[in-house]
Image (cartoon, rainbow, N blue to C red):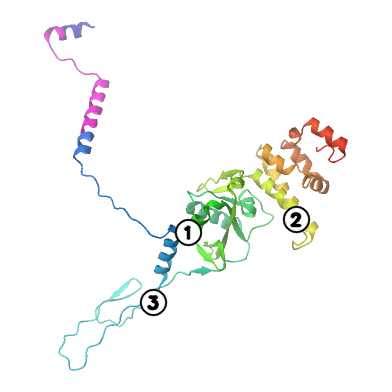
Amino acid sequence: MSLKDWVRDLLGLSRKPSQSQRRRAREERGRRYHKRLRETKTPRPQLDVRISQPAYQWSQSMGELLDNRWTPIPRRAPQRGSSVPVRPPPRTYQGDSIRPRGGSVRVPPTMPRRPVEVTPSNSSMDFEIVEEIIAVIGRAFPHIPYAVTGLAAMVHHGYTQRYPRAVTILCPSTSRDVVRCWAVAQGMYRVHDDPDTFGVLTSERKMRAVRIQFVSTAAFDEVEITRTRSGGAKVVALETLAAQIARGYVADLASNSAPGHPMKRQNGYAQDMRFVLKKMVRGGERLSYRTACNIVTREFWLPFTLSFPDTVPLFEYLGLSALVDEDEEEEEEAEGEWGRVL
């Protein structure tokens, strides 16, 4: 204790509180004030709303109700010679202008209607339109599991060889009803005879298609997802795109009903795979074990690498050679099935 404090205690003088003591005193006064405020405050009334229909049926019925035409009730003109006073006509509107009473402007008999079903454009979209639609999807489905996939996802990652005619998104099948209703509620348009496709009106004043592809929950959980920098929309990652291209290549080899020349379609798959692999190499990424298992298969690896050997160094750089077991290599060489993968 300092001499100054000892003299203060001796004379009975009050000691000046420190800064921390004053701060604690202010906090204590604030806590007591808010406690008294909560005790004396009247609770807000709560209103419980119960709807007898499911959410998607209620949304659909409300949309149809709002789309109905509104027709004003005509006034009955008084008979000639009647003593009933005639009220002046009400104000009439035309756009944003107001005419005085007795004006000659007529109110349109119907209100403009929002189209119930549309037909999207079938032309290709450039990078700006694809990014605009992805941003719209990100704002419309912030709480719903989804991922933009296909050619639209590749264009988002920088692909410029081809452009999509529609944007495809993956969704788990358990969210089917929620996605359909929420898309209409967020301003998308229904497409005729296709409940899983919706229209989005873009800045170029064209209706563009957004196709929803529903998959199982287990398949959706295996999808690697990245988020866009602006808006936080969910887009399929590059390694998942590589696995999807591999599955599409195998399905094309097994099917003979696809349009176009087979070699031309296979060259298209190889072009897509080269872009994805080079993009991953530039970004310093590596293929995960789960993605590698979908690529190093007998159905894909042998025909693809024999037809397009320039992709083998790209696969090796991404780490596929490190995933091959030496014992399995010896067994495969002995059986004469595969030989060495890389």
Residue linked to disc 3: 110
Question: Is residue 125 shown to the viewer in this render?
Answer: no
Residue type at tag 1? Cys
Residue linked to disc 1: 181
Would residue 86 appear left or right of 250 to someone viewing this image? left
Please tell me whether residue 195 is drawn above or below residue 42 in the rendered image.
below
Q: Which SS class for mark 3?
A: loop
Q: Earlier in the sequence, mark 1 or mark 3?
A: 3
Which residue appears at 49% of the width and 61% of the height?
Answer: 188
Residue furthest out toward the front: 52
Q: Residue 283: horizontal and vertical position, in percent?
A: 65, 39
Q: Which SS class for mark 2?
A: helix
Q: Quadrant of the C terminus?
A: top right
Is the stretch drawn in magenta largely helix, strand or loop?
helix
Q: Earlier in the sequence, mark 3 or mark 2?
A: 3
Please tell me whether residue 333 is drawn above or below residue 256 in the rendered image.
above
Q: Residue 333: horizontal and vertical position, in percent?
A: 86, 36
Residue type at tag 2? Asp
Q: Residue 258: horizontal and vertical position, in percent?
A: 74, 61
Residue linked to disc 2: 252
Asked if labels 2 and 3 touch by Cβ distance under 8 angstroms, the answer is no
Between marks 2 and 1, how big is the CA–CA gap? Answer: 34 Å
Residue furthest out toward the left: 11
Q: Mark 2, residues whose alpha carbon is within 10 Å: few (<14), some, or many (≥20)?
A: some
Q: Residue 38: horizontal and vertical position, in percent?
A: 23, 38
Q: Which residues are magenta?
A: 9-33
Would residue 159 appear left or right of 66 to someone viewing this image? right
